[in-house]
Image (cartoon, coloured by chain):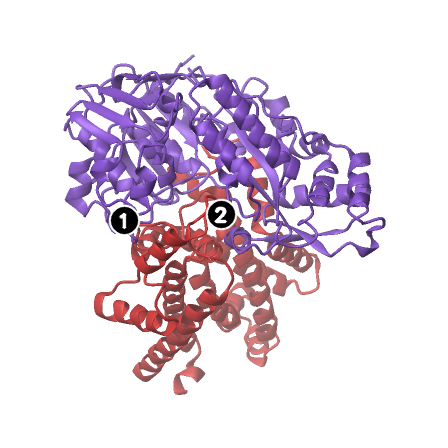
Chain colours: A purple, B red
Amino acid sequence: MTSCRSKSDVQIANEAGILIVGNSNEPKGLDPHLVSGVLESNIIRAIFEGLCVEDPAKDGSSLPGVARSWKSNAEFTEWIFNLNPEARWSDGVPVTAHDFTFSFQRLLSPDPNWPAKYSEMLHFIKNAQAYNKGEIKDFGEVGVKALDDFTLKVNLRGPIPFLPEITKHYTWYPVPKHVVLKHGEMNTAFASPWTRPGNIVSNGPFKLKEWKTNHRIEVVKNPEYWDAETVSLNGIRFLPISNYYTETRMFGDDQLHVTYSIPSEFIPYAKEKYPDQIRQEPYVGIRFLRSNIRRAPFDNPKIRRAFALAIDQKAICEKILQGGQKPAYSITPPFGEYKPPKVIAFDPERARELLKEAGFETSAAFPDISILTTDSDTGRREAEALQAMWKEHLNINVRIMQREWTTYLQKQYDADFDLAAGGWIGDYLDPTTFLEMWIKDGGNNSTGWDSPRYEELLRKAENTADVPTRMGILAEAENILLEDTPVMPIYWYTTNYLLRSEVKNWHPLLLNNHPYKFVRLENN
Amino acid sequence: MLKIILSRIAQTLVVVFFLVTFTFFAIRAIPGNPFADAKATSPEEQAALEAYYGLDRPKIVQYFNYWKNIVTKGDFGDSLSMKGRKVSTLISEAFPVSLKLGFLSLLMGIGLGIPLGTIAALYHNKLPDYLAMIVAMAGICVVAFVLGPIFQVNIARPLQFLNVAGWSRSSDIILPAITLCFGVAAYLARLTRGGMLDVLSQDYIRSARAKGVKPFNVITKHALQPALMPAVTYLGPAFAAIITGSFVVENIFLVPGMGQHFVLGVTSKDYNLVLGLVLFYGILMGIANLISDLALIFMDPKLRKG
């Protein structure tokens, strides 16, 4: 049988220095200004680079990227980034401060035909929001300036001590002015072919080599990259494996170095079969229920609180998910210097009292309500567990309404739901990434809830430079949100994935954004 | 003959026209928003996207523009979900994959189904008949999402040279093709058995046997051709269906074919992609039916008159 034996995909890739990554799905695009998903960001982070880059082993620490060094004034409102003159686009053209100003101007464009997904990530910059909304016409008034080719000055709307952390997000990455303008106007959106293979020019450790729809995306080492000698991999292959069962089986058949996920039913099996390869790490993300406070019965905070307290979070984590998720007592998970207030915890006794106080002695009179969720298996099982808990602890029947993805989203935007399961993943390591979304008419709020006091505290935090004081103000704001309970926290996410042991320099990171430039493959 | 072909082409065009028209309005009537995203789409962004794709105009105007772009520019529009990519590009990338996989599994299905059906008919109501029909029923009942993982775990994992899933090695076609072929084989076996039983009871077969023609020749020379008529009728549409891909098989085996475009196009409300696929599928179905009609005419002289 030896003649039949051939090398596995991983063996071949190890010899070629290529990392094979399960990446869940076909990306919607690769223009950093027009996407918003995690799987797109995984590819964009490989081929582009921002001012600072992730530390491969430490959360909240930033290493030089395009910026060789940076400093701020004492108030953290003005930052100077000194760019590395060696930084080059993959076509050899130097990356300059003008590429950054061009990028910021492009993302913030007020053009009504410019469908940027994520421009609010730049609203930290002075006047950026006003320019974005068309209130000021002159981009020169926005707080970003190229002092010379390699010096970028950024003025912020308030003190932001964690700005380097934010610059690691892909919305802050430069796009190549000379290439974008070659293939279209600054704000030619999807019609511009500048991100297609053959056209795209990028400044990261890797560059795009091949992009086959629903098949694979392959990036190769970028010889023009300023720090190419640090880059150990010769390339990365991203596979759009939407079926996680297949993905786990492919891992077992030596076809992948790292998976995107593990289906929860496979976790006990994976623990036994791959004890050294399974990774279960904290991840800054929260699973919650939005309640629609515009209509009865969830217009009553006591009822919202009662429903939240009747959720046996621990049972959901341990019995259904099995992935090391933690019961969430607040929306923002605890990380860094932030200590979120402990408000929500399973307490069926108190939940029944609250229900009684709200005037529902018996459940007979309780209105007909439903929980909206997606058509996924996990969505269904979670909803069934919640349904059983509310029945057991509150004696209330809740219908499950499963809708496929786009309809599920649309129903929330249209405020046509009672309770809706959902989640949020932090974009950067600061509580505001979880708290800003609950402001009045926030696009992702959907609950109809708002509180002037809450927003006042957020604005106060925005103007507070001292970190402990600022965190205290944010915790106070979060307390208001939790006490009023428009959102019922369920659990904090973990990442569950499989990683082969020859992959080195891949450490647990809260944002799960592993900087590929430091990753090595060690052949044994 | 020419008259038949021309009338069939005309029929196909009419069918495709109504199919596209119906789909055009039906897909726009189902709930959901093609631009909905986990990160909220602001009203401005929604408006920008609708304007960009011309979805802000009245439906009837959109409808005429759709045909106008096809007829004057050969343009099937842009995908709404995979932005920046043309529907025609997506189809032309995925179709060769599905064609290759579908064609192989159809051949395997024919190779398996027709002998199975013939054997079943020859041993009518005896053990081989029952066995063959059990296999055929199983082929219809055991769906791909059960069969696929079974093959992955029990065949691909132990065998070094077979991958669990993927589309980069030449051997990657084997498991999805086997998974797909069972359904076809099962139908063909049942249709062939029925046709064969019918033919075997005809007088001319009895005459052939009485004349002393060898049993093997009775089957292959006299019985098989007319017995295959129902199977051939089925093969036309089956061919069109199988070469346009299967969502389940592609999803399990990571095949970059057309099947996933069909399903994901609908769930993501990618109007242009769905319409392009329906149009393409309609035309393919017309061609496949025409070919199977021509084959039947070739096989049965009685049909040549009509």
Marked residue chain, label 2: A
Q: Is residue B304 left or right of residue A474?
A: left
Q: Dot 1 surroundings within 10 Å: few (below 14), some, or many (20 or more)?
A: many
Q: Which mark is residue A189?
A: 1
Which circle, 2 or 1, is nearer the viewer?
2
Q: Position of residue B232 (x, y in %)?
A: 47, 69
Which picture quadrant has residue A279? top right
Mark pair 2, 1: CA separation: 26 Å
Q: Are marks 2 and 1 in contact (CB under 8 Å)?
A: no
Which picture quadrant has residue A97? top left
Q: Position of residue B242 (x, y in %)?
A: 45, 58
Return the residue nearer the eye: A470 or A220. A470
Q: Position of residue A418 (x, y in %)?
A: 64, 52
- Which amino acid, by three-letter code, is at mark 2? Asp
Q: Is residue A343 left or right of residue A166?
A: right
- Looking at the image, the residue that sits furthest to the bottom is B305
Q: State the residue at coordinates (18%, 45%).
A: A183
Q: Position of residue B205 (x, y in %)?
A: 56, 75
Query: From the viewer's perspective, is residue A237 above or below residue A214?
Result: above
- Looking at the image, the residue that sits furthest to the top is A524
Marked residue chain, label 1: A
Query: From the viewer's perspective, is residue A225 above or below residue B130?
Result: above
Q: Identify the image quadrant of the C terminus of chain A.
A: top left
Kind of element beneath mark 1: loop
Q: Which mark is residue A441?
A: 2
Q: Earlier in the sequence, mark 2 or mark 1?
A: 1
- The image shows a total of numbered marks equal to 2
Return the residue nearer the eye: B69 or A309. A309
